[in-house]
Image (cartoon, rainbow, N blue to C red):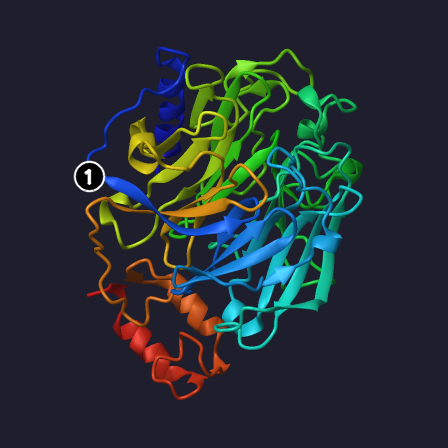
Amino acid sequence: MDLRLIRTYAIVCSLAALALECSAVHAGGTLLTTVRIATGLQRPVGLTAPVGDAERVFVIEKRGRIRVIQNSVLLPTPFMDIDALVGGGNSNNDERGLLGLAFHPDYFNNGFFYVNHTNNSSDTAIARYTVLGDPATSNVADLGSRVSLLIIDQPEGNHNGGWIAFSPNDGYLYIAMGDGGGANDQHPFPGNGQNLNNCLGAMLRIDVDNGDPYDIPPDNPFADGPGGACDEIWAYGLRNPWRNSFDPENGNLYIADVGQSAREEVNFQRGDSTGGENYGWRCMEGNLCTGLSGCTCNDPSLTRPIHQYSHGGSPFRCSITGGELYRGCAIPDLQGTYFFADFCSEQIWSLRIGVLGVEDRTAELAPSGSSIDSISSFGRDGLGEIYICDQGSSSANGEIFKIVAADGSNACVAPCPADLDGNGTVGAFDLALLLGAWGPNPGHPADFDGDGNVNAFDLAQLLGDWGPCK
């Protein structure tokens, strides 16, 4: 996608009438709805799965547990319970707790997964764990396997960010950090959002496959920079990035950043970015000047949002919940569609890069009588289908909904075995997954012939199936 089109989209959105937001349009295509696949959860705030896992999704409960939904059944035993290590997360509005989960790209081989949580000092902790037994089938984590990667001081209890994920392009772990909390980023000049000397208000990027416990990628834009810069910073100028999404096809990154008092925004980073983007907080909120110092409002070097919307209105809007990009096979005309919501108004929208306008999906996905009323996150399963997390109104009535075609159709054909990431096409990412599993590996999805080894015979099948699944 030409960056000029992205900038044009942002400009048109910002100039649209009625609160300077893009008007809702009807994109046509498959009519959508949601089905509830689980209830009885305790404040779910995230959902993910290992790439290619066709049976399970893993749900983050804010108080410190990870639950497993297998074949649409919520398992009674948690995958992991680290409640004793987690600080906060005791109410729907508490921004602390267990906030992020990411499975290593080679999870089926090494069993590694990573969590982001606030600890008992309310600071951000990033840690690695290992699953017990076969990663392809085990639903129990080894609590004794914890390896601490990072502890980042949090001056306030809010704006913790919390999302973590591996880029499909470079395999590095990305970590979203809020500005440290409080109103208007009133921390020492230039504010944490513009301060490269700490790791707050930024998107971080680390190499977990090298170093002890990790390495700084040598092409991080501020690695070994002057003045003691946070070497982990990949991009900055963020207030509280609450849920982000990589496009598994090209590594494009969508960042939903919660505003202060006027604007909510969706930021965008191309998959071929070299990093260093400044998204403008604290001198800008969306396309508005805040009057705060730290950077120059409307400086052309700042990266503007591709979409913003205003606070207020009816229903009242106040806080963006990002956001997930559809790359499943069940609804082909939904490919490349990004979904996001507002926590206060319970409205749900979608957009596509290069297509002007934002579609209001609320009536489809949360129709009258639906209980989707506390949207805390979106998530994507191992095959690219999208889910909505509803925290519920009490500590034990959280729900998970799946976005499906309203007519009950499912365009997914039986996936070709070599389509390891489940996107309907055998391509470079599938090849990378196979090569990462090379050698004795009984039960691994890349062991197509079932001989207990991922080897040249399996590689030959993958190359023979290259391209769209038939």
Estimate the x, y position of residue 61 in percent, counting from the top left.
58, 49
What residue appears at the point 27 percent right and 69 percent down from the top-left corner?
A: 416
Residue 426 position (above or below residue 203): below
Q: Is residue 169 left or right of residue 9?
A: right
Q: Is residue 399 left or right of residue 334?
A: right
Q: Is residue 407 left or right of residue 18?
A: left
Kindly identify the amino acid type of the residue bearing the numbered disc 1.
Gly
* Quadrant of the rendering where the C terminus is positioned: bottom left
What residue appears at the point 54 percent right and 16 percent down from the top-left corner?
A: 262
What residue appears at the point 57 percent right and 48 percent down from the top-left corner?
A: 42
Residue 424 position (above or below residue 192): below
Q: Which residue is mark 1?
A: 29
Estimate the x, y position of residue 365 in percent, counting from the top left.
33, 37
User: Farthest bottom residue?
Assistant: 451
Q: Is residue 266 left or right of residue 93?
A: left
- Comparing 1 with 450, the one in front is 450
Locate residue 364: give its quadrant. top left
* Quadrant of the rendering where the N terminus is positioned: top left
Estimate the x, y position of residue 255 in percent, counting from the top left.
50, 36
Tell me, yes or no, if residue 272 can be seen here.
Answer: no
